[in-house]
Image (tube, rainbow, N blue to C red):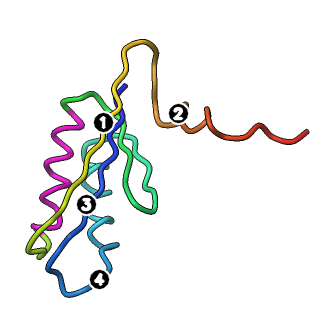
Amino acid sequence: MPLMEISIVPVGTESSSFSSVIREVCRVIDQHGLPYQVTPTATVIEGNIDQLMNVAVEIHRTPLNHGADRVVTQITIDDRLDQPMDLHSQVAKVQPSPIR
């Protein structure tokens, strides 16, 4: 299943912090019922391509709907056909093996 990494930067707000906007973004993703993982600089979401595009539009508009004058959004989509892919398996591939 495709993975989308999305990062938003609200501009023209009263605060340099935007964690409240990211909380709203998480609510949007939850409403779509998609698995996701928040990282310090972006959010990675798993879904089919149509779901990802629809949620990306809503995520992009979230800061604008909460008072930002401008938003900069970066999106990366990883979509492969040769083997299954999901959030957990992609992370597990790079995790070190437990020490025995």
User: In the rendered structure, which disc, 4 or 3, sits on the residue that comes first in sequence?
Assistant: 3
Count neighbours of disc 2 (C-alpha within 10 A) and say few if under 14, some if 14 to 19, many if 20 or more: few
Could you tell me the amino acid type at mark 3? Ile
Q: Which residues are magenta?
A: 51-65
Q: CA distance from mark 1 to mark 4?
A: 28 Å
Residue 83 x/y as whole percent: 46, 15
Q: CA distance from mark 1 to mark 3?
A: 15 Å
Could you tell me the amino acid type at mark 1? Ile
Whether the residues at callouts 1 and 3 have beta carbons within 8 Å, the answer is no
Q: CA distance from mark 4 to mark 3?
A: 13 Å
Count neighbours of disc 4 (C-alpha within 10 A) and say few if under 14, some if 14 to 19, many if 20 or more: few
Q: In the depicted view, which residue is nearer to us: 88 or 34?
A: 88
Residue 68 x/y as whole percent: 13, 74
Residue name at image x 18 percent, y 61 percent: 72
Residue 53 x/y as whole percent: 18, 38
Q: Which mark is residue 90?
A: 2
Q: Which mark is residue 16?
A: 4
As for residue 62 lying within the magenta part, the answer is yes
User: In the rendered structure, which disc, 1 or 3, sits on the residue that comes first in sequence?
Assistant: 3
Residue name at image x 43 percent, y 55 percent: 38
Toward the top, the furthest residue is: 82
**Secondary structure beneath label 3:** strand
In the rendered image, which residue does mark 1 sit on?
A: 77
Residue name at image x 20 percent, y 54 percent: 59
Could you tell me the amino acid type at mark 2? Gln
Q: Is residue 66 above or below residue 42?
A: below
Residue 56 x/y as whole percent: 20, 46
Q: CA distance from mark 4 to mark 2?
A: 32 Å
User: In the rendered structure, which disc, 4 or 2, sits on the residue that comes first in sequence?
Assistant: 4
48 sits left or right of 3 in the view: left
